[in-house]
Amino acid sequence: MIYAAVAAIVVVFILFSSLFIVQQQTIAIVERFGKFRRTAAAGLHIRAPFGIDRIVYRVPLRIQQNNIEIETKTKDNVFVRLNLAVQFQVDSKKVVEAYYKLAEPIAQIRSYVEDAIRSSLPKYTLDESYEKKDDIARDVFDTVSNEMFEYGYCIIKTLITSIEPAQEVKEAMNAINAAQRQRQAAQELANADKIKIVTAAEAEAEKDRLHGVGIANQRKAIVDGLSESFNELKSSGLSEKDIMCILLTEQYLDALNTFAKNGNQVIFLPAGPTGAEDIRAQLMSALAANKKIKN
């Protein structure tokens, strides 16, 4: 019974030591006596016990990311620090090459990325490097993916997450941008002032034009009114001299009434009973003199 129990225990131990499990998205590398034997995909597997078959490595098939920081210079000799994210994955058909050909795949990817960046970025100036960031990343992708495919690594994507020049360069760029914006703001303010001045001048000119039109219309209305009054008085049998006296007297009294309403203004006119007659005489003399000159 004891021997049977011991034998059962040994059998169970051998059985459990022969079984192994491989996780999903993982491939196990199995060696026998230090030589590659086979690969094992996800699931439950059996191997030779007592270390005859040994799992030397479990290769992950999931997408991995390697963050790389590189310092190099641009075409205009500005040193910048780039942060790149390289996403890669082991090809399930080339697991053996991925494990046995490269001892340090992460370091190898980094070397290829640095070489590609230092070949691509010097083609562009600092300003262009921001604009052509995707083109630079594409150049890095093409170079690294071609090199790493031979070793069983698929480069999924290369991303340039940041481009950082030196602090002095950033401050200079900010100063340049600030000066440009201030100059633009000054130009906009000057244009706004110009528009205000031009608009005000146009408004003043329009105001003067309308004022002149108003005065002209007013004078025309006065002339028309006087002409109508003159014709009405003339039809009543009055002489032209009497009509002129009546009209001048009326205008004289209207002028006195208007100035009386504006108490802050002062004008010197004949205020006596013969004031209207004096003004009429002066006007008639002026009209007669003007008529002689024209003749």
Image (cartoon, rainbow, N blue to C red):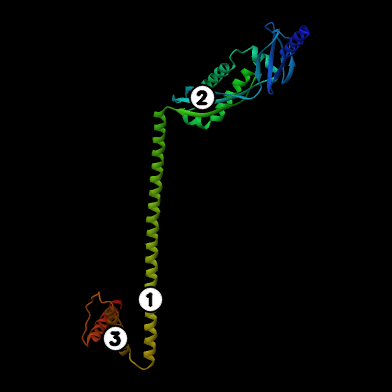
Where is residue 53? Give x, y as percent. Answer: 71, 9
**Which residue is tagged 2?**
121
Q: Foreground: 43 or 192?
A: 43
Give the distance between the C-alpha atoms of the residues marked 3 and 2, in whole angstroms: 98 Å
User: Would you call the spot at circle 3 few (<14 residues within 10 Å), some (14-19), or many (20 or more)?
Assistant: some
Q: Is residue 152 visible?
A: no
Q: Foreground: 269 or 262?
A: 262
Where is residue 44? Give x, y as percent. Answer: 74, 19
Q: Quadrant of the N terminus?
A: top right
The three-letter amino acid code for the residue at tag 3 is Thr
- Residue plotted at (59% across, 20% down): 144
Q: Looking at the picture, does residue 71 appear above or below residue 47?
A: below
Q: Foreground: 234 or 16?
A: 16
- Residue plotted at (29% across, 86% down): 249
Q: Secondary structure at mark 2?
A: helix
Where is residue 68? Give x, y as percent. Answer: 53, 23
Indicate left or right for 255 with 97 as reference. left
The three-letter amino acid code for the residue at tag 1 is Gln
Q: Is residue 28 visible?
A: yes
Give the distance between the C-alpha atoms of the residues marked 2 and 1, in whole angstroms: 80 Å
Label of residue 249 in the image: 3
Q: Which label lies toward us, 3 or 2? A: 2
**Which residue is tagged 1?**
218
Where is residue 90? Give x, y as percent. Answer: 65, 20
Sooner in the amino-acid sequence: mark 2 or mark 1: 2
Q: Secondary structure at mark 3?
A: helix
User: Would you call the spot at circle 2 few (<14 residues within 10 Å), some (14-19), or many (20 or more)?
Assistant: many
| Among the 4 quarters of the image, the one containing residue 205 | bottom left
Sooner in the amino-acid sequence: mark 3 or mark 1: 1
The three-letter amino acid code for the residue at tag 2 is Leu
Q: Which label lies toward us, 2 or 1? A: 2
The mark total stands at 3
